[in-house]
């Protein structure tokens, strides 16, 4: 197992990270310039991303050099804690959003478009001794970052799937931050919370709580995307060339995470996104980052939209959610282009 010192010794920086990648990294370096030369020039060289403190977002961070190869010269990561969609619309161009939390955003009319799925799984629902199944959450206290926050909507969709009404049968405690929800659970003040990487890895390492649902391995959630790549609708309309190139950088970075998790984990340590190499590597090895090629992102949104519509958390039908909040054109083009 690589230790932190070894990781630093072998990781001189972002550029060197890509240069020293295996055949996949070499392909990125060779193919990206060729693709750029064959396309129309970028309409804009600046791009802004929502930056969340979550390890499963690794492709967004690894994409920085690939974005520069695509022609972007001003790349800005804007830090946030929660409420990603609102931040995206107001201050950023691209971001990563959990699928269930994305559905109410589309329903509200925010100009956000889903471009692709990034990976399946990552969230894990933890319960105490009184909670052994999702149905056991009825009448219990569940800690969430905020009402309508990504973790609350995700749990609500799970409850709806098993026939529990999340609006009437659960006691929600809004804590302000997902990290605070974890603290309250560990201290025994709430019955359950939904952990986001690296929290599940930390919980397992300390043998705390019980995993009720692991969305990476437990059906039906393991059949659908967790995190999805989204963009500001205005950005897509004004800058279609920039949109495609940014998405291409994201998807190539996802391939690196899938095929070279050790190297990707070292990069995260070097850049300070996660100081613990072993934790970063565990997350990268667990998540199927190569599923963007085969899984259907439309089915993901349809599944969660149906659950939330059934319990009255959104007004739009699944069909309208897909019509208003998606644009698969760039993904379809890139799937053909990046077949290797």
Image (cartoon, grey):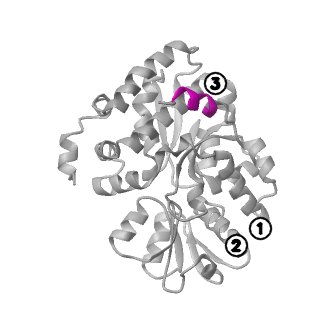
Looking at the image, is 132 positioned above or below residue 199? below
Q: Contact, CB < 8 Å: mark 2 with mark 1?
A: yes
- Residue 56 drawn above or below residue 15: below
**At 42% across and 40% down in the image, what residue appears?**
61
What is the secondary structure assignment of the residue under circle 3?
loop
Q: Counting residues from the N terminus, which is met first, the one under dot 3 or under dot 1? A: 3
Q: Is residue 276 magenta?
A: no
In this figure, which residue is indicated by the disc labeled 2? 166
The disc placed on residue 311 is 1
The image shows residue 116 at horizontal and vertical percentages of: 60, 40
Asked if residue 91 is positioned above or below residue 206 in the image, the reply reads above
Q: Which mark is residue 97?
A: none
- In the picture, measured across the screen, residue 239 lies left or right of residue 321, that is left
Residue at numbered disc 3: 239
- Which mark is first along the chain, 1 or 2? 2
The percent position of residue 298, horizontal first and vertical second, equals: 68, 46
Magenta residues, as a range? 331-338
Q: Give me the C-alpha separation between circle 2 and circle 3.
A: 40 Å
**Quadrant assignment for the N terminus:** bottom left
Examine the image and state in which quarter residue 73 appears: top left
| Residue sitting at x 59%, y 61% | 221
Which picture quadrant has residue 141?
bottom right
How many numbered tags mark residues here? 3
Disc 2 is placed on an element classified as: loop
Can residue 92 be seen in this snapshot?
A: no
The secondary structure that most of the magenta stretch takes on is helix
Could you say whether the residue bearing mark 1 is in a helix, strand or loop? Answer: loop
For marks 2 and 3, the one nearer the N-term is 2
Q: Residue at x 43, y 21 (%)?
A: 31
């Amino acid at each position: 197992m690589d230790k932190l010192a070894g990781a630093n010794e072998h990781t001189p920086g972002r550029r060197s990270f890509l240069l020293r990648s295996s055949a996949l990294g070499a392909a990125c370096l060779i193919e990206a310039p060729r693709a750029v030369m064959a396309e129309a020039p970028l309409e804009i060289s600046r791009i802004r991303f929502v930056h969340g403190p979550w390890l499963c977002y690794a492709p967004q961070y690894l994409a920085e050099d690939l974005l520069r190869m695509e022609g972007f010269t001003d790349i800005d990561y804007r830090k946030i804690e929660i409420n990603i969609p609102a931040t995206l619309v107001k201050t950023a161009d691209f971001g990563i959003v959990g699928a269930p939390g994305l559905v109410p955003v589309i329903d509200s009319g925010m100009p956000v478009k889903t471009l692709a799925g990034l990976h399946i799984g990552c969230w894990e629902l933890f319960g105490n001794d009184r909670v052994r199944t999702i149905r056991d959450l009825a009448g219990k206290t569940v800690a969430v970052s905020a009402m309508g926050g990504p973790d609350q909507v995700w749990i609500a969709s799970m409850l709806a799937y098993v026939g529990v009404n999340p609006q009437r049968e659960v006691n929600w405690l809004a804590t302000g931050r997902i990290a605070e929800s974890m603290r309250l659970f560990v201290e025994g003040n709430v019955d359950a919370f939904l952990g986001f990487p690296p929290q599940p890895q930390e919980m397992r390492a300390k043998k705390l709580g019980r995993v009720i649902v692991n969305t990476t391995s437990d059906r039906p959630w393991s059949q659908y995307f967790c995190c999805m790549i989204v963009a500001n609708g205005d950005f897509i309309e004004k800058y279609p060339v920039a949109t495609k190139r940014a998405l291409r950088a994201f998807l190539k970075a996802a391939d690196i995470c899938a095929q070279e998790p050790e190297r990707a984990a070292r990069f995260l340590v070097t850049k300070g996104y996660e100081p613990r190499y072993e934790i970063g590597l565990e997350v990268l090895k667990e998540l199927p980052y190569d599923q963007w090629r085969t899984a259907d992102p439309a089915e993901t949104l349809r599944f969660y939209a149906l659950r939330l519509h059934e319990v009255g958390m959104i007004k739009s039908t699944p069909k309208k959610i897909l019509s208003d909040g998606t644009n698969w054109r760039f993904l379809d083009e890139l799937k053909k282009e990046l077949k290797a």
